[in-house]
Image (cartoon, rainbow, N blue to C red):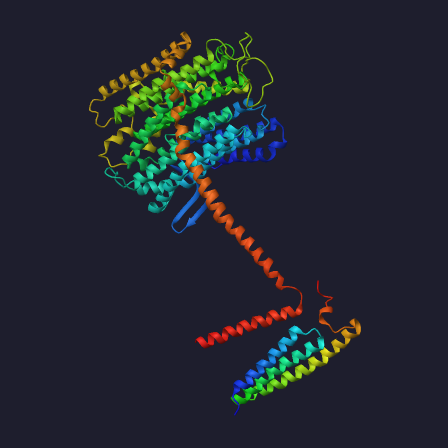
């Protein structure tokens, strides 16, 4: 029998924090707001850790029932929580990284007048995200799903007086709505065909079904609809456009929501639904193709960005593409592994970028940075760790997870692998480009002491307005989370060292029970995806050869990473004028990449503009004004006109009333006589 | 025997005369008399139908109408006298204190 873990406390604690700060934070001191915000998110983390320590003694999946929600005939949905290895990983990532980012925000947001509001939203986000990962049914998950969207909207538009921030928030919300539409339709299909939304009930019904290999079927439809939802939330093609704009929010928000946690909800959802996807190979292929394309596409955009946060945003989109690629080839645990390591190093990258932005007084353009290595030693070293990790330099977290994904991708198709390796190269290039531009060379901002000519600059825009000159290291409260995340970025990968490198892939084995193939035994391909990569290839009669092959592929991806590093070093450190010459050579291509392939413009002209114009001319001017408004107005006008005429009857002259009565009865009588005659 | 339509036409004419007098005349006494004329027009049609259908109900109705008309005449004349005493006029158009 399972002990009562009181899982419900984990989401409820941040909700309480959000309520306290939201209702009372405006009138209390910053210190009090800080204590409340940190206490409730920290308590959630502590409770999650407590759950993790008792985890091994649990019967899995652990389910906890809290309250009735919907009872309608045989259909029922409850407020109930579900804990297995997958939720536990997500739980720890969300609460752990979330708590660190809360600490960091204390330093980053201290000068902001909306300080209490920020912490209230941040805690609210934690509540919804934890609901999402702990839900035991799709509907509760959907509540969390929508809630994180709301929190994301609130936080992107946190500086809502800035027009770009407000519209970025709207864009995120609307694009997500498109994805949620698909998600909802998928849920309706589940209800219609399985009569339930509870994970265990749905999956138990699906498990006996065989894969839909030929032609599309119900599961394929559900899978693709769920994928549409995941694409919206996790910023995959074609719905990725909101994420780069979301960088308008405060940097801790970018780190927490738009790098570490919320955007990975799509990956979590696809992994959670792996029972469905396993039986829908077409949907799974779509997942892999979308992931692969997104990874490559976003990485190329990242090359040409000059805003430090935009580079990281496209990098996030690209890394999420890797996770989808992993899910799409059936390597769900590799996807989750990358999700975890990505949460560490990308969260760290954003926080470090925030620290840089904080230091140079709100400047985000990398062209005005440089030479910050000595001025921001802590930021520099932590960011170095994260950059090495994301680039896939051996020994750091990103290396193990990315390598795992690439190897699994190769087992599915060499094309995925090839695009993946090229993407790894590009990733390494743009990350080191960012690193060199920010920390090496001369300082190019105008606040520096060496009298650089001030050009068209407006330093210190946007938030805070730090009332101090010069570049300076961030306060301790910001540096400590950076250091912790840096340590995690370095060692986080060692939980899943693949067999070919002498490890035994603990992480994969840990998640194994969740993703163990539920297909009939003869389908060996997914079996490969479920167990350890190297030791247990089912067609592998020669596991030795497979291991050496994997080692070779590892070598190739490491080479790609170093190649990217070398290229970035050449272009942005050794001869910084070289990029300009290259750009002039390929001006056309550069323009296209620089404008993000004009995707925003294409969407604007193909979708947004027709929609706006159609709404304006047809729905607003046509239907709303001409039909609805005019009906009401004309009815009122007509009534007034008629009354204007008719009121003359009410003269107050008694005999005229009598005359009307007489005339009326005469008409009636005439009519009756006429009618009688006719009959 | 005189056909019933004769009676009805006569009754209609009487009623119409009453209506016209009621609408046209300004003297309150004349209006009063016009009302009586209308009542009697109706009475005529009642008795005509009663005779035609050999039913007493019509006759009984006429008695009722006469009684009510007598009562009305008593009350009405009293009001007219009171009005004349206070306003010194019998023109209804000038008795319009309640009108806006």
Q: Quadrant of the C terminus of chain A?
A: bottom left
Q: Residue A585 location, x and y as percent? A: 36, 13
Question: Which of the 4 image quadrants contains residue A397?
Answer: top left
Q: What is the x, y in percent for residue A280?
A: 28, 37
Between A455 and A536, the one lying in front of the other is A455
Q: Position of residue B46 (x, y in %)?
A: 57, 84
Count of numbered badges drawn on the protein: 0
Vertical placement of residue A79 versus A374, above or below: below
Rendered position, B43 above or below A6: below
| Residue A299 appearing in the image | yes
Image quarter hosting the N terminus of chain A: top left
B65 versus A401 height, above or below: below
Query: Residue A292: image x %, image y %?
Result: 32, 26
Q: Residue furthest left?
A: A541
Closest to the observer: A274 or A289? Answer: A289
The answer to which of B66 and A170 lies nearer the viewer is: B66
Instruction: Answer above or below: position of B54 versus A141.
Output: below
Q: Residue at x 61, y 34 (%)?
A: A24
Image-based side of A593 in relation to A38, left or right:
left
Residue A3 visible in the snapshot: no
B65 relative position to A347: left or right = right
């Amino acid at each position: 029998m399972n002990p009562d873990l009181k899982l419900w406390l984990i989401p409820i604690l941040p909700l309480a924090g959000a309520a306290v700060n939201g209702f009372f934070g405006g009138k209390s001191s910053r210190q009090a707001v800080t204590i409340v915000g940190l206490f409730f998110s920290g308590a959630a983390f502590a409770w999650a850790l407590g759950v993790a320590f008792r985890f091994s003694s649990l019967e899995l999946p652990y389910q906890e029932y809290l309250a009735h929600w919907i009872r309608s005939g045989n259909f029922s949905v409850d407020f109930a929580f579900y804990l297995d290895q997958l939720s536990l990983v997500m739980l720890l990532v969300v609460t752990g990284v979330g708590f660190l980012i809360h600490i960091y925000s204390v330093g980053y947001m201290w000068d902001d007048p909306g300080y209490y509001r920020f912490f209230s939203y941040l805690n609210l986000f934690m509540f919804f995200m934890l609901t999402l990962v702990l839900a035991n049914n799709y509907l509760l998950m959907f509540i969390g799903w929508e809630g994180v969207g709301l929190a994301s909207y609130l936080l992107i538009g946190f500086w809502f007086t800035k027009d770009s921030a407000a519209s970025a928030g709207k864009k995120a919300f609307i694009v997500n709505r498109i994805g949620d539409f698909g998600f909802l339709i998928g849920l309706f299909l589940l209800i219609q065909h399985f009569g339930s939304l509870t994970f265990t009930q749905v999956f138990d019904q699906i498990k006996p079904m065989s894969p839909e290999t030929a032609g599309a079927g119900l599961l394929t439809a559900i899978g693709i609809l769920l994928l549409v939802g995941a694409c919206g939330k996790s910023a995959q093609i074609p719905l990725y456009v909101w994420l780069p704009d979301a960088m308008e929010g405060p940097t801790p928000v970018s780190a927490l929501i738009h790098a570490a946690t919320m955007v990975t909800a799509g990956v979590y959802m696809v992994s959670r639904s792996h029972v469905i996807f396993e039986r829908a190979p077409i949907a799974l292929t779509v997942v892999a193709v979308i992931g692969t394309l997104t990874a490559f596409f976003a990485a190329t955009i990242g090359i040409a960005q000059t805003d430090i946060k935009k580079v990281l945003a496209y990098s996030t989109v690209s890394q999420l593409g890797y996770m989808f690629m992993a899910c799409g080839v059936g390597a769900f645990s590799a996807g989750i592994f990358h999700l975890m390591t990505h949460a560490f190093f990308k969260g760290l990258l954003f926080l470090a970028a925030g620290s840089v932005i904080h230091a140079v007084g709100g400047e985000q353009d990398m062209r005005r940075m440089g030479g910050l290595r000595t001025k921001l030693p802590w930021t520099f070293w932590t960011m170095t760790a994260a950059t090495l990790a994301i680039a896939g330099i051996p020994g750091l977290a990103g290396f193990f997870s990315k390598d795992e994904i690439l190897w699994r991708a190769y087992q599915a198709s060499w094309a995925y692998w090839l695009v993946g390796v090229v993407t790894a190269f590009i990733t390494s290039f743009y990350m080191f480009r960012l690193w060199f531009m920010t920390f090496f060379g001369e300082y190019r901002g105008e606040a520096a002491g060496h009298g650089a000519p001030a050009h068209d600059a407006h330093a210190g825009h946007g938030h805070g307005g730090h009332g101090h000159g010069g570049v300076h290291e961030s306060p301790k409260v910001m540096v400590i989370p950076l250091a912790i995340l840096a340590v995690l970025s370095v060692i986080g990968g060692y939980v899943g060292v693949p067999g070919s490198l002498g490890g035994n892939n603990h992480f994969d084995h840990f998640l194994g029970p969740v993703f163990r193939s539920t297909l009939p035994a003869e389908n060996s391909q997914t079996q490969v995806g479920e167990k350890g990569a190297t030791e247990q290839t089912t067609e592998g009669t020669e596991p030795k050869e497979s291991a050496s092959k994997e080692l070779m592929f590892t070598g190739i991806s490491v080479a790609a990473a170093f190649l990217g590093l070398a290229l970035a070093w050449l272009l942005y450190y050794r001869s910084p004028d070289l990029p300009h010459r290259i750009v002039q050579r390929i001006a056309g291509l550069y323009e296209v990449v620089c404008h993000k392939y004009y995707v925003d413009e294409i969407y604007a002209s193909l979708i947004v503009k027709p929609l706006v114009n159609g709404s304006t001319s047809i729905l607003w001017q046509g239907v709303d004004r001409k039909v609805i408004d005019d009906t009401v107005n004309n009815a009122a006008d007509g009534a007034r006109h008629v009354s204007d005429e008719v009121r003359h009857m009410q003269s107050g002259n008694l005999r005229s009333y009598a005359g009307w009565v007489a005339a009326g009865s005469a008409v009636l009588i005439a009519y009756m006589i006429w009618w009688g005659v006719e009959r | 025997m005189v056909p019933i339509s004769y009676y009805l036409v006569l009754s209609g004419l009487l009623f119409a005369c009453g209506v016209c007098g009621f609408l046209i005349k300004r003297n309150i006494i004349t209006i009063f008399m016009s009302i009586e004329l209308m009542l009697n027009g109706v009475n005529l049609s009642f008795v005509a139908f009663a005779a035609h259908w050999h039913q007493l109900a019509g006759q009984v109705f006429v008695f009722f109408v006469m009684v009510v008309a007598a009562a009305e005449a008593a009350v009405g004349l009293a009001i007219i006298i009171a009005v004349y005493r206070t306003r010194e006029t019998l023109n209804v158009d000038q008795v319009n204190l309640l009108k806006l």
